[in-house]
Image: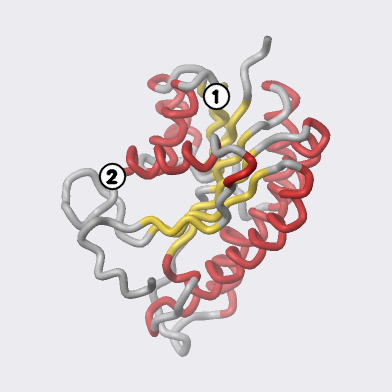
Amino acid sequence: MASKVAAVIGYGPGIGHSCAALWAANGYTVALVSRTASKLEAAAKTIPNAKPYPCDITDDHALRACLVDIARALGPIDDVIYNAGNGVWKKFDEISVDQLDAAMKTNVYGLLSTCQVATPAMIKRGSGNVIVTGATASLRGMPFTSAFASAKAAQKSLAQSVARQLWAENVHVSYAIIDASVGPAVPKQMHPDSIAREYWHLATQTKDCWTFMHHIQTSVSDMALL
């Protein structure tokens, strides 16, 4: 039997790497998607059954072609970890329309295209996961997150719309709110391996207990948004 296929959209050394390694350890072939080919090629040498797919996900045509290439080479995608994101830390009167558009392309338009290309095979199969890396910015805007919060809020709403449609097709769409900085050592940070385990929990939930919005915090969080 061919192995299942996972696609990590927005691979990086933190959450993306930890998810890719965990899915590979559970028998998946993992497609690593990011802009920098050298980074992906190096990662594919350390993660078993990982394949590099360089792609600028803000280029809609390139992203769609990349996803088609993954399915053609590895098989239909079973799990998507949509980990792409960008940050422009400026106030509303400091950002440009182009900067806001770039945030939307990465967080929202890329997610839309990924779902449009990857989920039809999941629907046909009657199973699959789309897990989106979100942020507390999706719940509230701050003066310096005018672009980031706008894009993340739109991303959450899109993910919710997709979930309400695809859950009925036995495809689990979930949105993980990462409510801390990510790093390996500082107590107030989340370790990326721990986040990956939470994502794996989402991917392996039984259908009688699916989660959409998974708000992940540290034990020392002030819990201000709960």
Q: What quarter of the picture does the C terminus occupy? A: bottom left
Where residue 26 sits in the image (x, y, percent)?
48, 22
Q: Name the residue under label 2.
A: 191
Distance from label 2 to label 1 (Cα)? 24 Å
Identify the image quadrant of the N terminus.
top right
Quarter where residue 25 is shown: top left
Q: Please rate how many residues cluster around mark 1, counting C-alpha atoms within 10 Å: few if below 14, some from 14 to 19, many from 20.
A: many
Give the SS element for disc 2.
Answer: loop
Residue shown at 36% from the left, 62% from the top = 179
Residue tagged by mark 1? 51
Residue drawn at x 46%, y 90% as measured from the top left: 93
Other-residue count near label 2 (Cα within 10 Å), few / some / many at <14 / 14–19 / ≥20: some
Amino acid beneath label 1: Lys
x, y percent for residue 176: 48, 54
**Which kind of residue does numbered mark 2 sit on?**
His
Residue 202 screen position, x and y as percent:
52, 42
For residue 33, say whether it is visible.
no
Mark 2 vs 1, N-terminal side: 1
Element under label 1?
Answer: strand
Q: Which colouring convention does the figure follow?
A: secondary structure
Q: Is residue 149 left or right of residue 220?
A: right
Farthest-out residue, left:
186
Q: On the picture, is 182 further left or further right than 5?
A: left
Q: Please state which of the two labelled residues, at mark 2 or mark 1, is closer to the viewer.
A: 2
Q: In this view, does 116 lie to the left or right of 185?
A: right
Residue 108 seen = yes
